[in-house]
Amino acid sequence: AVLWPCHRGEGGPYQAFSFTKDGQIRSDSDFCADAEDVAAGQEIRMTKCKEGKAGQAWEFMRSPEADNAGYFRSRSAALCLTKSMRAAVLEKCDRPCSQVWQATVIEAGAPQTTGGKSMPSMSLKHSHKGGRVLCWVLTQPSMHTTKAYTVNNTWGRDCDKLIFASSAPHPGLEILTLDLGEAESRVMLWPKSQQMWMHVYQHYLNDYDWFLKADDDTYVVFPYLHE
């Protein structure tokens, strides 16, 4: 199974999934995540959903640190669904960040556990109990279509506001265009950061609870950050 950046309102049925009462990770196109005959380190497959199929049976293990995140464990392979580069693979359930998934659609009766105990069914929704977060990310024009695009379409979607700091604008990215006076380089990182912090202070100080500075090769697990 190949992973692609998420697009809000786009992507069609191939980016919309539900965790069902039968323990299936089911797409709107009626294909399910299938771990049958998949060993550790191998990619899972998306196969036609079939009731009672062992490889399509999963358990959602809720993270104790966040209401809307957890781990999907295959009942047949006893391994966990893991993000590996641009693929979804199975690995031993060691619970690193690459095994954390955000669950927003869970059907009543879907198998969930936490701390080894059964949990009642519930709908998991994004939580802002940790406060509103403004994220700003250092980038440069040569990275707009790669690293910045990836941030914008992955963890950046969970920021209450996301701004990129760069020396040039780019369609589809909210960029504060900075006047650096010279070409982009590592020696310009502090001037860029200084301008960006001043902009945030002048325009957003009273609108957000937290301010996160990151680089375009950073990955943030937001469920943990909000806790």
Image (spheres, rainbow, N blue to C red):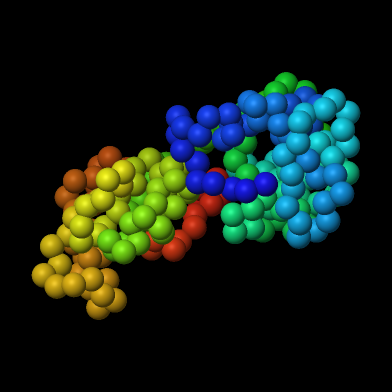
Residue at 20 percent across and 61 percent down: it is: 167
Residue 14 versus residue 76 in the image, above or below: above
Q: Which residue ends up furthest to the front in the rendered image?
A: 48
Determine if residue 71 is in view: yes
Q: Position of residue 36 (x, y in %)?
A: 85, 44
Answer left or right for 129 relative to 48: left
In this view, the residue in front, 43 or 127, is: 43
Q: Position of residue 23 (x, y in %)?
A: 79, 31
Determine if residue 121 is in view: no
Answer left or right for 143 relative to 108: left
In this view, the residue in front, 201 or 26, is: 26
Q: Which residue ends up furthest to the left in the rendered image?
A: 181
Q: Which residue ends up furthest to the top in the rendered image?
A: 108
Residue at 87 percent across and 49 percent down: it is: 37
Q: Position of residue 143 (x, y in %)?
A: 35, 61
In this view, the residue in front, 103 or 87, is: 87
Residue 122 versus residue 197 in the image, above or below: above
Q: Position of residue 110 (x, y in %)?
A: 76, 28
Residue at 67 percent across and 47 percent down: it is: 1
Q: How many marks?
A: 0
Answer left or right for 117 relative to 186: right
Residue at 82 percent across and 36 percent down: it is: 57
Q: Quadrant of residue 172?
A: top left
Residue 121 versus residue 116 in the image, above or below: above
